[in-house]
Amino acid sequence: MRQRPGGLLYIAQSAKLGSLKELPQDIQDLVHSKYPEYATAPATWVQPNVTSWTRYKQLQQQSGGKD
């Protein structure tokens, strides 16, 4: 949107699963092949904790996009 006025509506739904094995097989395969670090919960808390919003902003800034 660059500098135009406006807003963003974000709606999400989530559920806590007991393990990765409760996800559909295609998602399990994707995690194991491309994102193995997400196959298990982290052992320690890492700071800063990057949210999807801050990561998106980082990617936009790297590509020359505006806020």
Image (cartoon, helix red, strand yellow):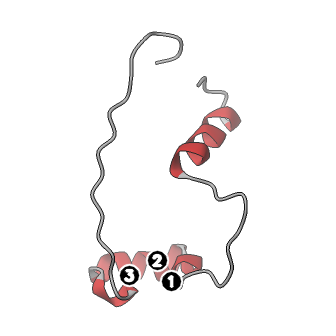
As drawn, 3 above or below 57: above
Between the residue at mark 1 and the residue at mark 3, the CA separation in whole angstroms equals: 8 Å
Count of numbered badges drawn on the protein: 3
Q: Is mark 3 in CB contact (under 8 Å) with mark 2?
A: yes
Where does residue 49 sit, x and y in percent of width and height?
65, 59
Q: Residue placed at 33% from the left, 76% from the top?
A: 16
Where does the image place residue 44, in percent across and percent down from the top left? 68, 80
Task: Of the two numbered discs 1 and 2 on the same chain, state the one appearing first in sequence.
Answer: 2
Figure quadrant of the C terminus: top right
Amino acid at circle 2: Val
Q: From the viewer's perspective, is the residue at label 1 or at label 2 nearer?
A: 1
Q: Name the residue under label 3.
A: 28
Residue 38 is situated, as x and y percent measured from the top left of the image, at: 53, 77
Please, which residue is most extreme toward the right here? 47
The numbered mark at residue 31 is: 2
Secondary-structure class at tag 2: helix
For label 1, the SS is loop
